[in-house]
Amino acid sequence: MTEYLQMTQKEIDRWKILQGYIDKKIKTQKEAAKIIDVWERHFRRILKNYQQYGEKWLIHQWRGTISNRRLAEKKQKKIETICLEPQYYDFWPTLMTEKLEEIHNIKISVETVRRIMWKIGIRQIKERKNYKQYIKRLRRANQWAMIQFDGSYHKRFEERNGWEVDCLLLAVDDATSKIMYAKFDDNEWKKAVFVFRKEYIRKYWAPREIYLDKFSTYKSNYNKATYEPDTPTEFWKSCAKVWIKLISAHSPQAKWRVEVKNKTLQDRLIKEMRLLGINDVKSANKYLEEEFVPLFNEKFWKEANWSLDLHRELTQEENNQLDWIFSLHSNRVIANDYTISYKSEYYQLYKGKIWFYPKLRVEIEEQFNWIMRILFRGNEVKHEKLKYKPVSLRIVSEIDTKESEAKRKQKEKRDKERYDNSKKMQKRYNYFKMQLQEEGLVWSDLHKEASRRTASCTV
């Protein structure tokens, strides 16, 4: 029976050279050794073994045997059982490898875990997609020179929190990829973002620049709105007061560091909280600050080119006014009676040491705990909340005009009635006077008798 040998191309080439030297087709050992790229002494060793043992000696002796580094069958079965447990149903190979070492004391390579997960059918090998290529922006040289900020909506508590979608606010340093601050909140609207930024500044001071998207909280999205003084948002005005520059990204790929962090946290953070049984926002925020973020940064951070800290320390005045800086700002015009209206309420302003006039503007600052103050050119104005809607001078003038018009009409009516009555009385008086003259009454008694008859007459 013919025996077939499975040889590689390198082994076939060696067999041809050795056989050619034996058949005298290659003259010298030096020439043959040069062809197969070995030393002449090693060629003589190969030739001797080939002549003694034949073609089998050219094949690697461990081919077809079980590797000494092969994973034990018992250990592989244990890993397969762990991977099939319910709490690991959506773990990817990298995180699964970490949990095997951390929880189950099994140290193994990521690729071995990937192969096992593919073998048992819980992961599939997918082809890479052809994505649009973007030019990669270089990192900032100094730490805290730029902070990338974004909000990510996801069901991180899964069914344990009633399938509610939460928002993770995330600030990532551009130079080191460190998570500087992270916090769960309901949304990415004004209150959540303002409180987040205020807590960040109190912890790390103010960064030079913040790189974020064009969400309406950060940028005016009207057709002609730009980052000009006449169209700022509330967040823009607050950051400008502490000398923070805002940069708007034109695409998600531009701020890819924070986007990648959000994608990673949507995978890792969900599973970590599932294993620890964290079901509410308060516990999740505590876990983020005390445990997850420090360990995550220790594993994935990169060293900056320069070690200079570019955070700007706030002055004592700025630090005291931080709650008012990150609050809602509005402008109102002072009415003629020194009142203003704000959110369907009316406030009476008092001058005191601050002198102002009607038609001028005052600034209203309102914190998110409903505390507010009124400023005129940077000075706080004393004010009082009115229980009723004040009547303006225009309305008072209109009321006075209507009342005077009504009084004038009443007077004209009374004067007309008096004139008509006097004409009637004069007509009667003349009638009785003529009668008395015909009767031959003396002139001295004529007027008296005619007046009496006129007053007593009802016709």
Image (spheres, grey):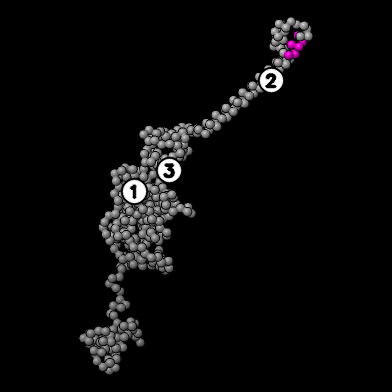
Classed neighbour count for the residue bearing mark 3: other residues with Cα under 10 Å, few (<14), some (14–19), many (≥20): few
The type of residue carrying mark 1 is: Val
Expressed as whole percent of the image width and height from the top left, the position of residue 392 reads 50, 33
Q: Residue at x 38, y 41 (%)?
A: 377
Q: Is residue 183 above or below residue 110?
A: above
Question: Which image quarter is the C terminus in?
Answer: top right
Question: Is residue 427 shown in magenta?
Answer: no
- Find numbered disc 3 in the image and state the secondary structure of the residue it sits on: strand
Q: Earlier in the sequence, mark 3 or mark 1?
A: 1
Do the CB atoms of the residues marked 1 and 2 lie less than 8 Å apart? no
Left or right: 392 with respect to 65?
right
Label 1 belongs to which residue? Answer: 242
Dot 2 amino acid type:
Asp
Magenta residues (range): 430-436
Q: Residue furthest left?
A: 41
The N terminus - image quarter: bottom left
Q: Above or below — where is 217 with respect to 120? A: above
Mark 2 residue element? helix
Which secondary structure class fits the magenta region best? helix
Give SS at disc 1. Answer: loop
Residue 57 appears at what percent x and percent y? 27, 84
Q: How far apart are the two marked residues, 1 and 2, measured between alpha carbons?
A: 82 Å
Q: Which residue is mark 3?
A: 330
Q: Earlier in the sequence, mark 2 or mark 3?
A: 3
What is the number of the mark on residue 420?
Answer: 2
Horizontal and vertical percent position of residue 401: 56, 30
Q: Is residue 109 visible?
A: yes
